[in-house]
Amino acid sequence: MDVLYFAWVRERIGLPKERIETQAATVAELVEELRAREDRYAAAFADLSALRVAVDQELTDFSAPLAGAREVAFFPPMTGG
């Protein structure tokens, strides 16, 4: 699946996008796999309350299932007027 990172998440990880193989059943399990990779991922996912997630371009939460998903995107909450 493709994992996309936006804004400061991309800056901390150093990549805009990567293709990964995962056995994670939910977004939360995917986050745990990513955190375990190296410190830059741990830093990016340190505070999940500061992140939003979309699965296949649909805004969802971290308990969302990943079965059949092609894309997961992580980004900070949107603000502005």
Image (tube, rainbow, N blue to C red):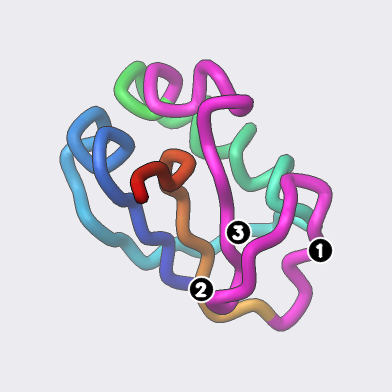
Callout 2: few (<14), some (14-19), or many (20+) C-alpha neighbours within 10 Å? some
Find disc 2 in the rendering and name its residue.
Answer: 71
Residue 64, given in percent of the width and then of the height, sits at 80, 58
Residue 34, given in percent of the width and then of the height, sits at 50, 37
In this picture, residue 62 sits left or right of residue 8: right
Seen from the viewer's position, the closer of residues 25 and 53 is: 53
Residue 74, given in percent of the width and then of the height, sits at 46, 50
Say if the magenta span includes residue 63. yes
Callout 3: few (<14), some (14-19), or many (20+) C-alpha neighbours within 10 Å? few
**Disc 3 element:** loop
Amino acid type, mark 2: Glu
Say if the magenta span includes residue 11. no
Among the two numbered marks 1 and 3 on one chain, the one whose residue lies closer to the N terminus: 3
Q: Which mark is residue 65?
A: 1
Find disc 3 in the rendering and name its residue.
Answer: 22
**Disc 2 element:** strand
